[in-house]
Amino acid sequence: CCLFVFVFEKKMIHSLYILCKAGTVLLEKHTREPMERTVLDPLLTEMNSASTLEDVPTIVAGTRFYLINVQRNGLFFVGVCPRETPPLFVIEFLKRVISTFNLYSSKDVSEKLVRKNTVLFFQLVEEMLDSGFPLITEANVLEMLILRPTMLNKTLTSVSSKKMVADKLPPGQLTVTHWRKANIKYGSNECFVDVVEEVNAIISKSGAPVTATVKGVINCRTHLSGVPDCTIAFDHGGRALDDVSFHPCVRITRWQNERILSFVPPDGKFELAKYRVYNITNLPFHIRASVNYKQAGGGRVEVDISSKGTLCEDVVLLMEFPKSVSNINCTIGSGNWTFQELTKTLRWELKRLPERETLTLRGNLSLSVSDSAPDGTPPVLASFRLPNTAISGLKLKEMQIFNVNYKSFKGAKYITTAGDYQVRT
């Protein structure tokens, strides 16, 4: 487990430290004079006193600095900044560092990867920061400066004069569209948009949503020659996009005035926008579940699920029972079920829900003889996939490409998956 630590003063990044969980510095970089490592003491104190890594506060106050951290997969990416530095500035930059390290290593960054790729990560930070300020954070531009350590790139550099690290910035980096490479040419021009949504919901026993929100991402993949100017319009003006954040290429003023996304896209894959939608009501299916415990060492579980007309695939329902439940025997109308005795988890898998049919699971519980009937009943945890569906109702109306003299292929795809989706019993 590693800690990525940035030191700011007057909105500038002075130093970077990468620490393991024990506090050992794995990588250290300074844009000015080196700072004393005692600046990390307040964070290390919180880490030592916390029972788990998740209990470490997001913002830790020191005598002169605030330590703002972002946690990913057991790692802490921490920015040390003065009081006048906006926290979101630090958080966004740390997320860019995380995604860049993950991209170059092709896996989630870890202490082992940092030790193995110390030189590579140091070179990346050198390009992402210039005189203490973020400069190049776009992955497609960084790949022009620092080649990814793939076998093909290593072979090309060994047999040619091409270097793994470029000597100068790519053309166009000092322009207003610094996220896009210059002089791009493709034989086949295309622009594809993926709308990916995740549903997080808590459903009451009666079937009414207690809370239901959607986290969405609009991903783009563009291979367009020249300097194209793209616009995307949505049905109903994209009313779902209220709580939204955009890629720097998006013209905010036009979105606010016309509800149209206008942008000069980066080359390749990038995240155009992220958004949240609250109070979702059109949930894909209805689940009714009940668990009854008897005093004579047994009980009964019943689960019914029916689609509301939306195509649902890869449906998995989980129920985690207490330790006093020794075994479950079930009968089902469709799919496959299993009961893991070690984790006490009942799992029901369905490849696809029929549109106008209710599927049922009925089971008998066996309780340990020495245990009394458990208190409370477990919720149903659901996961699923809705192909060609954006459950928030977001839908692209029109996509146009200007400032070009060629025809291009355009397309859009929608998919919805389950995040934390619970049904009370």
Image: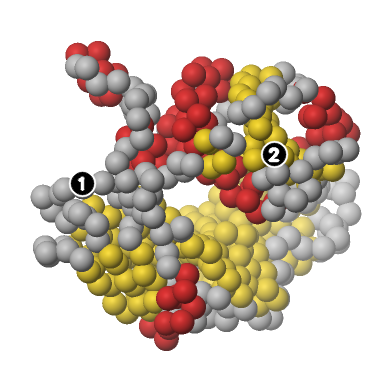
* Residue plotted at (45% across, 41% down): 136
Mark 1 residue type: Asn
In-front residue for pair 389/241: 241
Residue 248 seen in this snapshot: yes
Seen in the picture, residue 61 relative to 423 is either above or below; the reply is above
According to the image, label 1 marks what residue?
Answer: 183
Q: Quadrant of the C terminus?
A: bottom right
Tell me if 294 is positioned left or right of 266 in this view.
Answer: right
CB atoms of marks 2 and 1 within 8 Å: no
Q: Residue at x 40, y 42 (%)?
A: 139
**x and y percent of residue 211 in the render?**
68, 73
Evaluate whether residue 329 shows in this view.
Answer: no
Q: Residue at x 33, y 50 (%)?
A: 180
- Labelled disc at residue 8: 2
In the displayed image of the protein, which residue is found farthest to the top?
158
Please name the amino acid that badge 2 sits on. Answer: Phe
Q: Is residue 191 left or right of residue 335?
A: left
Q: Which corner quadrant of the image does residue 410 belong to? A: bottom left
Q: Nearer the viewer, residue 18 or 103?
A: 18
Category of crowding for the residue at label 1, using alpha-carbon neighbours closer than 10 angstroms: few (below 14), some (14–19), many (at least 20): few
Under tag 1, what secondary structure?
loop
Furthest residue toward bottom: 236
Q: At which x and y percent is residue 200?
A: 60, 65
